[in-house]
Amino acid sequence: MSPYWLNESCSPFTPVESPCTLGNIASYAINVSSAEDIASGLRFATDNNIRLTIKNTGHDFLGRSTGRGSLALWTYHLKSISFLDYNGGGYAGPAIKMGAGVPAYQAFSAAADRGLRISGGYCPTVGLVGGYVQGGGHGALQGLYGLAADNTLEFEVVTAKGEHLKATPAENADLYWALNGGGGSTYAVVLSQTAKAHADGRVAGASLTFNNTDDDAYWEAVSSWQTLLLNFDNIHGFNTVWGLTNQTFLLYSAILPDSTASAMANALDPFIQQLQDLGLEHTYETNDDATFYEHFVRYTPSLPYGEYLTNSVIGGRLIPRSVVRDSLPALIDTFRNMTSTGSSPLRINGIASNISHARVGNTAGSNAVLPAWREALYTTNLDVHFDADAPMAVIRQLQAEMNEKQDQLKVLTPGSGAYVNEATFDNPDWKRDYYGENYGRLLGIKRRYDPGHLFYGPASVGSDYWTVASDGRLCKT
């Protein structure tokens, strides 16, 4: 969880004799093991007018999974995994059913044991059934299968009224639609998800690093990389995860499912040649693995937790293909400015693959995923790291700077948006940027299943029904 939402009330970095109070952490939590546990917690919160929060694994930069003075429904220990042959909703084939608390690394491993692979996140500990899929859910296999929300077959939920329901394209279809991309913590409490599983196979991978030893050459290479992404966009299944500062470019990993190291090298060779022509030294490797899980392990050091830091401020923006194709010099100028200004170094990360409707095989409006995703060449994940013991004044300053950085990209990308799970909670344009044209329909579904607005999270659909008082209470606006 982002330290912004943990505040300084009980830090492990302060002296032992310092006061320790819960601050923004929930006052009590129900360790959910059944639908009945959830229904009981919902009744108690409603009857006693208590703020409610929902927490799965707690991977959250928007502050939706915690709240001062609240009762938390903690779904982390819902760890069941099963596999089935599914037939319904226009799909017939293998499927995985996961409890709400199943993290990516466990689901990937279980699928691999059965000769399967599934859509899931890069971070090994993110819960696949919580806010991850409900926000859309990007991952390494999205260029082949789409976002996680494009793979859902059904959800098992408990509504604010305590009803234990199934949501599918045929049953409670509006709720099914909203839960697939319409944002977490606001429509219902999810107990489980059933999702498509796919036959596994060989997976090609690659990584690359080069440094800024000549500023003009470095940014020319970054520009060439952007152009190359347009070519990768036409390769079925190709996905890259990369990051850059004003000093270093890293291709953390590239993936080409059902292919070989030589095919990966053929795709990257033109860029490697350009680095050589520009005189930029680099490290580079390609490989292939027998399964997706082996590829995941190769590029995710220190499993099961990975090397993901939480002491950071996150923002982001979806970059349309048209911007890279038609306004590349302006985009590179913006990247240069963003990475060279501010009180702390900024890193721009990109996750690139084609998830257009034509590629994924669904249609506009088939789920609540922000439509701008379908026009995007990639999504940016902007991050700034700070010391683990940094005071709140520093974190707030970085949060303000992150919004300013996001705004620089907004100017270049009118009508686009951002991945709600990797964005700022205090973006004044959050309705348009995170939900787009879907917002009105999503709000109607919210009001149908949660008419009392029991479920709340910053920048979640319907959240402006409330304001948060200094003591954490929710007050009607």
Image (spheres, rainbow, N blue to C red):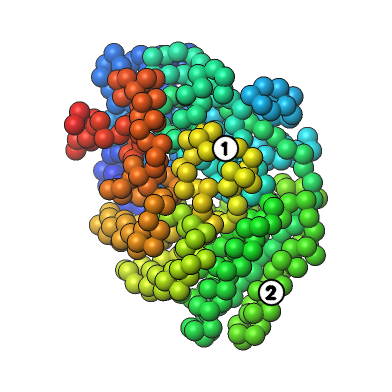
Q: Quadrant of the N terminus?
A: top left
Residue drawn at 57 percent across, 37 percent down: 363
Q: Tell me the number on the disc at residue 286.
A: none
Going by the numbered disc 1, the residue's amino acid type is Thr
Between 196 and 437, the residue placed more toward the observer is 437
Going by the numbered disc 2, the residue's amino acid type is Pro
Residue drawn at 28 percent across, 57 percent down: 400
Q: Residue 369 location, x and y as percent?
A: 49, 39
Residue drawn at 25 percent across, 30 percent down: 465
Q: Residue 401 location, x and y as percent?
A: 30, 61
Looking at the picture, does residue 299 appear above or below residue 267?
above
Task: State the residue position of label 1.
Answer: 363
- Direction from residue 35 to residue 122 in the image, left or right: right
Q: Tell me the number on the disc at residue 270.
A: 2
| Label 1 vs label 2, nearer the camera | 1
Q: Are marks 1 and 2 in contact (CB under 8 Å)?
A: no
**Residues at marks 1 and 2, CA–CA distance in whole angstroms:** 34 Å
Between 305 and 445, the residue placed more toward the observer is 445
- Direction from residue 326 to residue 394 in the image, left or right: left
Number of other residues with Cα within 10 Å of mark 1, as a class: few under 14, some 14 to 19, many 20 or more: few
